[in-house]
């Protein structure tokens, strides 16, 4: 008989959640796919903490822990694993696992004993770590596995895996399945939260589809396929497979080169050679997550390479160069200036295109009138933080469209956004390509990047290992990602 771990019955929390019914059983890996982002964060909060509900009941291990009549606001024994690790980098793995464990009462620490216990826990997972290894020295994948062990030691009722593919590479994702199976066979329950069905299908025993704060479909194993999912994401399929947008990727690239990396050495980057032609979109997929941040630093002009050269438009990159646009991860947070109005955020990088922009109110008002259709009225009064992620993300990319760069580098642009945001973002990148912008996308997982790419570069050990052209994308057998048809 199945042992129930969590049950949500008719849970409602307007305007975010409406009549949510979810059952989770011991030893299951259950996928939660958000076709849009509405209600996902609130649903995960309800699993973690017994907050006030408008209606419904929440049970943990057959015990009523929360309902609409009374909420104790206590934390449930849930572990959430996401990009920001729960581990302390300056402590060793043993210290994170055993000394920081709830209920640890040891006054005399015997490191040899702790190291032996750690090695016993790692052995079934085929993961080898030296004793007293600092967490800061671990890879993203190793940190992920250590957090599983920590959740096991703390006897968590459930582990929520949130957007794992945004920080764990595709190669490591392939190694993750047997590890999840091992922990689930030992009674651990997982809720795998992501925005791409192929990723959820690969790991999960069954899946819930969520849209507009409602569970719209419960998928069992025989229903977890592209045919079924296309009935619920037909808008996405139609928008990205229109012949008119696909045709722009059949044109040969221009002969001129906008980006040239030649024999580049910098930390984990080892003899990297890349060329991007004008108007070309290239995805650089790194099997190790480490080099992406390092390459982004070089492209921003903050630091210089140890040896070799990196040139954009024949020059060394500079932060002051408005012909270059850089989009880090989560730009809706990092590229928004909370102290500025929506209007000033939109026009922040346009002053080189519009003379005396900041001194001419009439010119700014005229631009604001044109932008009202997308961003609403009274743009000068509005604060970006008052708006949802989708609005802020649109704001960032509209600023880039107004800036009109000739070279753009973006890190994981499709990470942690829902289907409708991905549709809008693909459309924006189509516009940039039609303008002739050269685009480099740095990624650890594909998501929808191939939909806007001319070439895919596979990077391993700091070097380009393989190149695939658009008509060859189907040859890459990554776990996550839609491919152009």
Image (cartoon, rainbow, N blue to C red):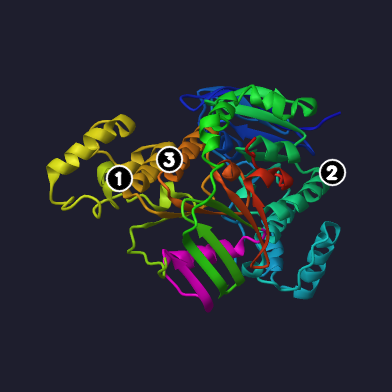
The residue where tag 2 is placed is 185
Residue 272 percent across, percent down from the top left: 60, 69
Mark 2 vs mark 3, CA separation in Å: 48 Å
Task: Label 1, secondary structure: give it.
Answer: helix
Looking at the rendered image, the disc whose residue lies closer to the viewer, 2 or 3, is 3
Q: Is residue 311 magenta?
A: yes
The residue where tag 1 is placed is 346
Residue 314 percent across, percent down from the top left: 42, 68
Q: Nearer the viewer, residue 477 or 384?
A: 477
Task: Label 2, secondary structure: give it.
Answer: helix
Q: Quadrant of the N terminus?
A: top right
Looking at the rendered image, the disc whose residue lies closer to the viewer, 3 or 1, is 3
Residue at (46, 55) in percent of width and height:
278
The residue where tag 3 is placed is 431
Marks 3 and 1, the one that precedes in the sequence: 1
Residue at (55, 29) in percent of width and height:
242
Q: Nearer the viewer, residue 174 or 357?
A: 357
149 relative to 380, above or below: below
Q: Is residue 301 magenta?
A: yes
Residue at (58, 37) in percent of width and height:
44
Residue 88 seen by the camera:
no
Marks 2 and 1, the one that precedes in the sequence: 2
Marks 2 and 3, the one that precedes in the sequence: 2
370 relative to 56, above or below: below
């Amino acid at each position: 008989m199945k042992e129930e771990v969590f049950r949500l019955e008719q849970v409602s929390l307007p305007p975010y959640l409406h009549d949510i019914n979810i059952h989770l059983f011991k030893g299951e890996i259950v996928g939660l796919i958000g076709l849009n982002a509405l209600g996902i964060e609130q649903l995960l909060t309800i699993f973690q903490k017994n907050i006030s509900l408008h209606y419904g009941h929440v049970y943990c291990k057959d015990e009523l822990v929360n309902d609409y009549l009374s909420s104790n606001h206590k934390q449930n024994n849930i572990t959430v694993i996401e990009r920001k690790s729960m581990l302390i980098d300056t402590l060793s793995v043993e210290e994170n696992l055993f000394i920081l464990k709830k209920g640890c009462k040891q006054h005399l620490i015997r490191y040899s004993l702790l190291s032996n216990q750690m090695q016993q826990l790692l052995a079934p997972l085929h993961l080898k770590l030296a004793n007293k290894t600092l967490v800061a020295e671990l890879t993203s994948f190793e940190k992920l596995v250590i957090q599983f062990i920590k959740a096991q030691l703390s006897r968590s009722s459930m582990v929520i895996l949130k957007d794992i593919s945004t920080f764990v590479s595709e190669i490591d994702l392939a190694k993750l399945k047997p590890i999840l199976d091992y922990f689930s066979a030992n009674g651990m329950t997982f809720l795998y939260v992501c925005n791409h069905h192929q990723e959820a299908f690969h790991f999960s025993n069954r899946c819930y589809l969520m849209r507009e704060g409602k569970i719209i479909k419960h998928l069992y194993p025989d229903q977890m396929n592209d045919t079924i999912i296309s009935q619920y994401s037909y808008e996405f399929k139609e928008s990205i497979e229109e012949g008119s947008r696909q045709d722009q990727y059949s044109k040969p690239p221009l002969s001129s080169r906008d980006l040239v990396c030649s024999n580049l050495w910098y930390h984990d980057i080892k003899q990297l050679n890349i060329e991007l032609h004008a108007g070309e979109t290239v995805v650089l997929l790194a099997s190790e997550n480490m080099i992406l941040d390092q390459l982004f630093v070089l492209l921003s002009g903050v630091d210089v390479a140890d040896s070799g050269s990196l040139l954009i438009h024949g020059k060394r990159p500079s932060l002051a160069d408005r012909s270059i646009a850089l989009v880090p991860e989560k730009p809706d947070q990092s590229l928004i200036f909370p102290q500025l109005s929506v209007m000033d955020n939109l026009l922040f990088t346009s002053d080189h295109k519009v003379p005396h922009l900041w001194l001419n109110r009439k010119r700014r008002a005229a631009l604001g009138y044109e932008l009202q259709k997308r961003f609403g009225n009274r743009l000068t009064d509005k604060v970006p933080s008052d708006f949802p992620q989708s609005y802020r993300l649109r704001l960032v990319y509209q600023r880039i469209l107004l800036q009109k760069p000739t070279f753009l580098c973006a890190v994981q642009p499709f990470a942690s956004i829902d289907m409708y945001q991905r549709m809008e973002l693909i459309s924006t990148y189509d516009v940039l390509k039609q303008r002739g912008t050269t685009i480099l996308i740095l990624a650890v997982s594909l998501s929808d990047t191939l939909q806007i790419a001319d070439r895919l570069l596979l990077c391993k050990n700091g070097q380009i290992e393989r190149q695939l052209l658009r008509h060859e994308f189907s040859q890459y057998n990554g776990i996550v990602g839609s491919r152009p048809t």
